[in-house]
Amino acid sequence: MTIGVFLRNHKRMTEEKITSEASRATKAQGLKIAALTAYDFPMTQVLDRAGVPLIVVGDSVGMVVLGYQTPPITTAEMEHQLRAVAAQNRAD
C-alpha cells in the first residue's frame, strides 16, 4: 500500500498526482521514471537534490524505520512520516 507520492516538477517537488493515464503514456513512449523511497526529511533532501523525479512513501516504513515485525502501521504513524517527507517542499 503506497500512501504518498511526490513528483518532481522542474526544480521543486510538488504534490501533483501521477495518474494512471500519465503512467501508461510514459510507458507507451518507452520512457523510464526513477522512483525511490524516502521516510524522512534528510533522505528526501538527498533524493530531491539528486533529481529523483518520484519519491514514494509507503507503509513499509513500519518495518524499515519503526522496527515492526509485520507491515501494519497506523494512519497517525504514516501521517507523521508523510509530513517529514513533505517538509522538503517548505525547506526550499
Image: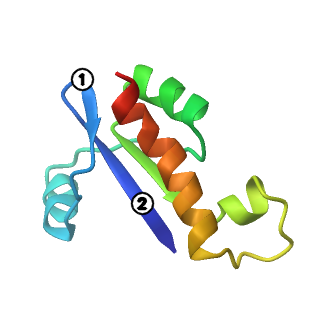
Amino acid at dot 2: Gly
* Direction from residue 66 to residue 20 in the image, left or right: left
Which quarter of the rendering shows the C terminus?
A: top left
Image quadrant assignment for residue 67: bottom right
Residue sitting at x 33%, y 37%: 53
Q: Which disc, if any, is residue 11?
A: 1
| Residue 59 visible in this rendered orientation of the protein | no
Compared with 74, 42 (above or below) is: above
Which x, y percent locates residue 29?
A: 14, 50
Pick the front one: 89 or 47: 89
In front of the other: 80 or 22: 80
Residue closer to the observer: 51 or 66: 66
Percent x, y of residue 60? 66, 64
User: What is the secondary structure assignment of the residue under circle 1?
Assistant: loop
Left or right: 61 as drawn, with respect to 20: right
Residue of label 2? 4
Q: Residue at x 53, y 24 (%)?
A: 46
Q: On screen, 28 above or below 7?
A: below
Q: Residue at x 21, y 69 (%)?
A: 20
Left or right: 88 in relation to 84: left
- The count of marks equals 2
For label 2, the SS is strand
x and y, in percent, of residue 71 in the image = 72, 75
Amino acid type, mark 1: Lys
